[in-house]
Image (tube, grey):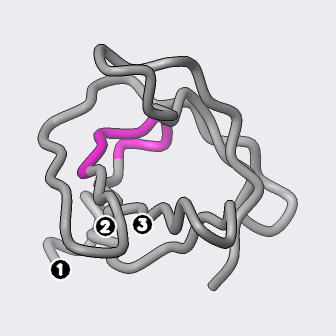
Amino acid sequence: MLLQVETRAGPHGDPEPISFTLGSQHITVLDLIDRWIAADHSYYKIAASDGDTYILRFDPAAQQWQLTLFQSSRHGA
């Protein structure tokens, strides 16, 4: 699922998510839990303002963000 993500420059100048829009819901990143770089993408595991956990993937070549994992705090998933 493609996302609209607001970013700031990370420690090495790479984009770091600070908020994103999921459907009609605006979600703020409260904590960047983890990040890792793969060959073609960067991944960010975040704790969000809705209480849930997400993994967002950034494709620097296409300049696109995708939702790759969602974990609900309400359902213990």
In the image, residue 65 above or below residue 52 = below
Circle 3 is placed at which residue position?
Answer: 57
Q: Mark 1 or mark 2: name the one nearer the start of the chain.
A: 2
Circle 2 is placed at which residue position?
Answer: 72
The residues colored magenta run: 45-51
Q: Nearer the observer, disc 1 or disc 3?
A: 3
Q: CA distance from mark 3 to mark 2?
A: 18 Å
Of the residues shown, which amino acid type is indicated by label 2? Answer: Ser
In the image, residue 45 above or below residue 28 = below
Tell me the quadrant of the picture where the N terminus can be found. Answer: bottom right
Element at label 3: strand
Circle 1 is placed at which residue position?
Answer: 77
Of the residues shown, which amino acid type is indicated by label 3? Answer: Arg
Q: Mark 1 or mark 3: name the one nearer the start of the chain.
A: 3
Residue 50 as seen in the image, left or right of residue 12: right
Question: Given the current orientation, which residue lies at the most extreme right position?
Answer: 24
